[in-house]
Image (cartoon, rainbow, N blue to C red):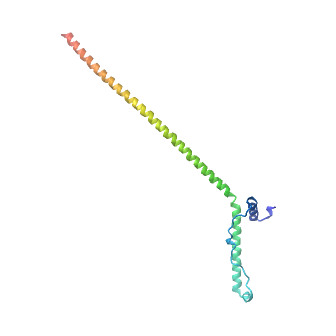
Amino acid sequence: KDLANLAPITSAALKYLSKTGELPDMNNSLLESPAITEPKGAASTHLQDWKQAIDSAKTEYEAQRNRLVNLELQAKYDPWVPYLDQAQRLLNETTQAMHAERRKVDEVNAARQVSQQQVNTTKLSVLERRQEELFQKQYQLHIASMQLQDQIAQLEQESIT
């Protein structure tokens, strides 16, 4: 139970096992390598056979070392995966909220524009009617003024005669 005395990768694997009840998925293909065999019999005296056995052992050692490095990296960076998932979820939620707010703003703007157009149309028609009324009154005043001038001219002529 004392994980402090274990290698970091072993303690990480045990912690994962205690949390989930299963070992993490691992790529076992790295463990599959040609068997390292010691040259036997007549081959044990040949230098070339020994070099080949040593090369195989070095290859196997390097594969196991790479696997250990990969496992240590996984133990170091895998704890960040839930945080990255949470950050992505928050980003998605925030983006959706932003789009919803944008839709609301667009709806409010569209409604405002329609109401302004209706008000402006109503105001415009009222002003047009008012203008027509003023033109008619001006025309009537002009006609009345001309009639008065004619009457004045007639009265002046009658008074002269």
Q: Residue furthest left?
A: 161
Nearer to us in this view, 138 or 92: 92
In the image, 100: left or right of 40?
left
Numbered label tally: 0
**Residue 27 rendering spot, x and y as whole percentages:** 67, 68
| Quadrant of the frame with the C terminus | top left
Q: Which residue extends farthest right?
A: 2
Is 59 positioned to the left or the right of 140 in the image? right
Q: Quadrant of residue 154?
A: top left
Where the N terminus falls, by quadrant?
A: bottom right
Residue extending farthest to the front is: 21
In the image shown, does 107 or 71 lie closer to the viewer?
A: 107
**In the image, what residue occupies the spot 61% across and 49% down?**
93
To which quarter of the image does residue 19 belong?
bottom right
Residue appearing at x 80%, y 64% in the figure: 5
Give the x, y percent position of residue 102. Answer: 54, 45
Q: Is residue 61 above or below residue 154?
A: below
Q: Position of residue 97 (x, y in %)?
A: 58, 46
Q: Who's the residue at 35% across and 27% down the image?
A: 132
* The image quarter in which residue 57 lies: bottom right
Residue lying furthest bottom in this view? Answer: 42
Question: Percent from the top left, x then y, of residue 126?
Answer: 40, 29
* 85 vs 29: above or below: above
Q: Is residue 52 above or below residue 127?
A: below
